[in-house]
Amino acid sequence: MNEKIENKNRVKTNSTLQSLGSLIALAGLVIIFSIISSNFRSINNILALLKQASVNALIAFGMTGVILTGGIDLSVGSTLALTSMLCAAMVRGDIPPILAMLIVLLLGLGFGSLSGILVTKGRLQPFIATLITMTVFRGITMIFSNGMPMSNLGEDPFLTGIGKGTLLLIPVPVWVMIVMFALFFFVLNKTTFGRRIYATGSNEKAARLAGVNTNKTKLIVYIASGFTATLAGLILLSRLGSAQPTIGTGYEMDAIAAVALGGTSMSGGRGKIYGTLIGVIIIAVLNNGLNIMNVSSYYQDVVKGIVILLAVLSDRNR
Amino acid sequence: MRISMKGINKSFGGNPVLRNAQFDLADGEIHALVGENGAGKSTLMKILTGVYKRDSGEIFVDGKPVNFSHPKEAEASGIVFIYQEINAMPDLSVTENMFIGREIQNRFGVLDQAEMERQSRQIFQRLGVQIPVKKTMGELSIGQQQMVEIARALMVNAKVLILDEPTAAMTLEETKILFHILGDLKKKGVSSIYISHRLEEIFEICDRVTVLRDGQYIGTNRITETDMNNLIKMMIGREIGERFPVRHCKIGKTVLQVKNLTHKGIFQDVSFNVRAGEVLGVSGLMGAGRTEIMQAIFGYLPHDSGNLYVLGKRVEIHSPEQAKKLGIGFITEDRKTEGLMLQDTIQKNIGLPNLERISQHGVLDAKKDAKMVQSAIRDLSIRCSGPTEMCENLSGGNQQKVVFAKWIFINPKILILDEPTRGVDIGAKIEIYNIINRLAENGVAIIMVSSELPEIIGMSDRVMVVHEGRIAGILDNLSGDNSTDHQKVMQENIMILATGGKLE
């Protein structure tokens, strides 16, 4: 027998308040850095900061979808490395860069689906499944590149544009981030597929019994994650002008941190994409601000950890 | 041991749950504590055992005032609460569970496994139950787990057992054993406080019954001096009329036909049909395969062979998605783990099987969504603060109504109900029976699996009995015949079939 009254003490999760803690943390950081450093608060620095944030943002958007279904995608960093390497190779092989970029975006879908198939058909736990794809994709990248970076990619307007260009004064990567944010926001909040994602993470059994094809739902979120990782890889490739075989190592952790900062539950079912965006920007502000203040990167990691802890705690205590 | 609770008050966050409640337990009796969900039964017992602190009031044990501040203290005095949700560790063995926190060590400080197993075996023997002490707890049935809890209580020399809905998940066989044990214990002077929604059971084993309503004490009666109707009236404060409302239905053509459905090792050669406007009751012992057959029809469990026909046409069902498209709805046995997303709103839960209905080209239509949930709340009188109330905050009966709403809006042709009123109080039960009747009157073919025989007999047009994965028989139930004779005969026949016997 469940006495109704006993449940009254439970925290009611109000979706608009869910990421308030992170929002406060973000505001606090921005204020502190702005006071300390005039360089920080310049428009150019803010744009640079957002540009830096875009790579993690794209990966974290895909990650949010996966985590909402109760999964996790550790393979994003390797996917990013593999697809940008393949793109560089194609460009060097005289394939038109725009075509190469489209091809690797399709490949990115395919790589994501591999993780998805391991999770759904293979019934592996998402952590294990994507640990496998992470390791294998990285290995393939190394084999393919012989461990060497691939550079001299020429000056194609598309390939340089996606990472380095600006449109209406705003860097193109920031535009890409905004468009993908809008897309994820729309899908998660306004479509039946979004509802299925949340339902799968909230109670998979109940979702299946309500006629939701939970396997299909899961497969698609991994595919989407592969896609956003590839997109992030193209931006990095463009910015660096070369494909690095070891690039993207540890990126999955930054993305997961952003998702957690945004108040998304690691067991799935609850969370907001704008929370993730806030989380991404917090991490970018920290990196940027601490760099400006010349804090050593060793200390930066400690500070990052503490900020994540504080944001998550303040969300829980409300 | 005599217990007397007087003038107990308790509020949670300004919300009074118990108002001047009282309770009295005599030596060597089985005392039923009944009331609707939220009446305060569990709270009262938790106050007795020190789980909660009372705001005011007195508790006397054998005439002496007591004040337990922790269930451990109550246990030390011989009062043991056996919770409805079993607090066992499923991966540990039965013995390990029995001795948790009071393991026996030899003089070197090493666990004496053999001695603990010997004592466990001894106590099970005393109880007259067969439970392998080396098995892990998770391998036992819920009923067996309950027995382990009782055995554990006896090991600490319990003088009073508090049982909260012990039979909710038990088979009839296990229930019988439990009653036997409780009767035996009574003779040895161990009293029991018995909380149950199944009033039939109370009349079977209890000596006295105390009724609570809205946190208040309503009265205590000797069981021989009251009857079912009187008890229900005390519980809900008004006459409820028929416990099983009458249905006026024209039974139409066959909607679902199942032919030789088989899943090796679970069920074999299952054949039956259901007609429009008909309620087909499905009875049988727990573990007979009733739920599995239903899951297979719904595509949640695969089948090895056999065919399904909807409105005469052969159909393939391999997933709930396909079943839903064919107009089959399934209200599952366990609404908490299978029926609802508990930490989501009523709106999201009802929307889930109806996403196509509330969207266009995959984009949600907020207006349609809101309209659907509002009409659900109104039509089924779901008591809640609004569409955005979390399902976990609803009472069992209202949760179940949300589950019904989920499926009603797909306009099902066939609705499978698995234990539709489990853990639901009497008032809400009748509301659910009315919903079932209304659906049947609208031509829905209904399959209702239930472990409660009165419900099966009171609601079904026909009763299908499952025994060890096979259909033991399908009985015509002269629905509308509420005479006790008829009920007795039905009950006997169902039991004979359910236990593998043959009818003459």
Image (cartoon, coloured by chain):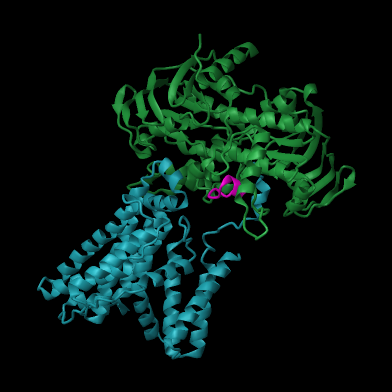
Chain colours: A cyan, B green
B118 sits to left or right of B407: right
Q: Position of residue A197 (x, y in %)?
A: 40, 53
Q: Which is more toward the observer, B278 or B96?
A: B96
Question: Residue B94: within the magenta?
Answer: yes
Magenta range:
B87-97
Q: Is residue B42 visible?
A: no
Q: Which residue reaches farthest right?
A: B63
Q: Establish if B251 lies above or below A87.
A: above
Measured along the vertical axis of the image, is residue B316 above or below residue A261? above
Residue at the front extreme? B107
Front in this rendered view, residue B276 or B262: B262
Q: Residue furthest left?
A: A94
Instruction: Name the side, left or right, on which B464 lies relative to A87.
Output: right
* Position of residue B156 in the picture relative to residue A188 (left or right): right
Main SS type for the magenta part? Answer: loop
Quarter of the picture containing the C terminus of chain A is bottom right
Quarter of the image that includes the N terminus of chain A: top right
Residue B148 located within the stretch drawn in magenta: no
Query: A88 or B201: which is nearer to us?
Result: B201
Residue B219 found in image quarter: top right
Q: Is residue A285 above or below residue A119?
A: below
Q: Position of residue A200 (x, y in %)?
A: 42, 50
Q: Is residue B378 left or right of residue B220?
A: left
Point out residue B32 in the picture as x, y percentages from the top left corner.
Answer: 74, 33
Residue at (52% x, 30% y) in the render: B286
* Residue B170 x/y as whole percent: 59, 33
Q: Is residue B125 visible?
A: yes
